[in-house]
């Protein structure tokens, strides 16, 4: 209900409905506050106008109505904070799924692209070295001498994930602050220089299913940068494809490890 009422994109993650419900009730409360205090303001203008009160009353209003109203507002805010916000925050921030049960990905932002790194079949990310970074052939600076890097996969602006399985992303940036945003997944997390920040969600709707729902055969989930990060900020956009489990495995099988591809392109072998 709140998703449509607020004009939000369709939810495609397990936790998205919770966020929409909380956001909706916050809007309801803010609307009630706006109407309530606006009405009280108009009442005060009429009730205490100069023509009706030509002489100042230094005793003031003796009614405690406003105090009770303020108390109700405090209670409602406490309910939202303690009953909704803190539990949801704890669940999203402190209760990360085990890596063994998740699709684990590294995403590194830079002006103006998203570098995406999969650990390969061994499930271990290869070592990276900033001295090995090459924008064309090795954007993440993977170290070919590290055995764990031999089967690692990388893409640029193309994130592929399986449906109905937790996704654990280790987010970082090469340069300035970026903000990793997936609207339909209700995910937004700043990428801070020098810090690797974990973020997780569970997609529940494949790309093909969403295309059918929307009636758009060319629909794609977008990866946006929600933080002004330079003159090219407008073009820092990626795409996320949510597969069935079988489709994701098929996609992985089609990919060529980065270091293997680099060796194939090296004329010196």
Image: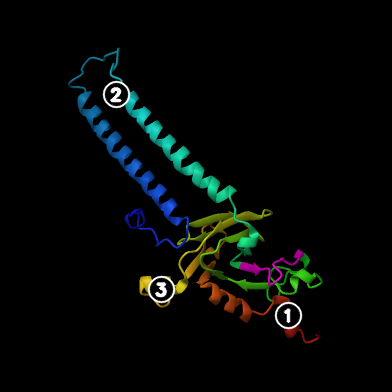
Is any part of residue 172 visible from this angle? Answer: no
Crowding at dot 1, Cα within 10 Å, few <14 / some 14-19 / many 20+, comes out as some
Crowding at dot 3, Cα within 10 Å, few <14 / some 14-19 / many 20+, comes out as some
Q: Are marks 2 and 3 in contact (CB under 8 Å)?
A: no
Crowding at dot 2, Cα within 10 Å, few <14 / some 14-19 / many 20+, comes out as few
Is 78 or 174 nearer to us in this picture?
78
Q: Earlier in the sequence, mark 2 or mark 1?
A: 2
Residue beneath disc 3: 211
Residue beneath disc 1: 260
Q: Residue at x 62, y 55 (%)?
A: 198
Q: Residue at x 55, y 45 (%)?
A: 90
Mark 2 or 3: in front is 3
The figure's colour scheme reads rainbow
Q: Residue at x 72, y 72 (%)?
A: 134
Which stretch is magenta? 115-130
Q: Circle 2 — which element?
A: helix
């Amino acid at each position: 209900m709140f998703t449509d009422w607020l004009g939000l994109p369709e939810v495609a993650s397990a936790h998205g409905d919770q966020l929409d419900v909380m956001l909706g009730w916050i809007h309801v409360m803010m609307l009630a506050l706006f109407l309530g205090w606006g009405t009280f303001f108009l009442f005060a203008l009429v009730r205490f106008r100069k023509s009706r009160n030509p002489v100042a009353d230094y005793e003031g209003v003796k009614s405690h109505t406003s105090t009770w109203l303020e108390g109700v507002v405090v209670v409602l805010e406490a309910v939202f904070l303690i009953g909704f916000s803190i539990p949801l925050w704890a669940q999203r921030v402190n209760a990360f799924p085990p890596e063994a049960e998740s699709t684990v990905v590294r995403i590194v932002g830079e002006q103006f692209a998203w570098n995406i790194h999969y650990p390969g079949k061994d499930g271990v990310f290869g070592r990276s070295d900033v001295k090995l970074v090459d924008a064309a052939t090795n954007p993440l600076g993977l170290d070919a001498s590290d055995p764990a890097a031999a089967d690692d996969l990388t893409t640029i602006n193309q994130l592929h994930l399986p449906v109905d399985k937790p996704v654990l992303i280790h987010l970082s940036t090469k340069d300035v602050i970026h903000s990793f945003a997936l609207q339909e997944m209700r995910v937004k997390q700043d990428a801070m220089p020098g810090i690797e920040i974990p973020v997780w969600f569970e997609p529940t709707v494949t790309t093909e299913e969403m295309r059918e729902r929307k009636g758009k055969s060319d629909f794609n989930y977008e990866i946006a940068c929600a933080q002004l990060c330079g003159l090219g900020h407008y073009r820092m956009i990626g795409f996320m494809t949510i597969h069935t489990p079988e489709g994701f495995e098929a996609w992985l099988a089609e990919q060529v490890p980065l270091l293997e591809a680099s060796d194939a392109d090296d004329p010196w072998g």
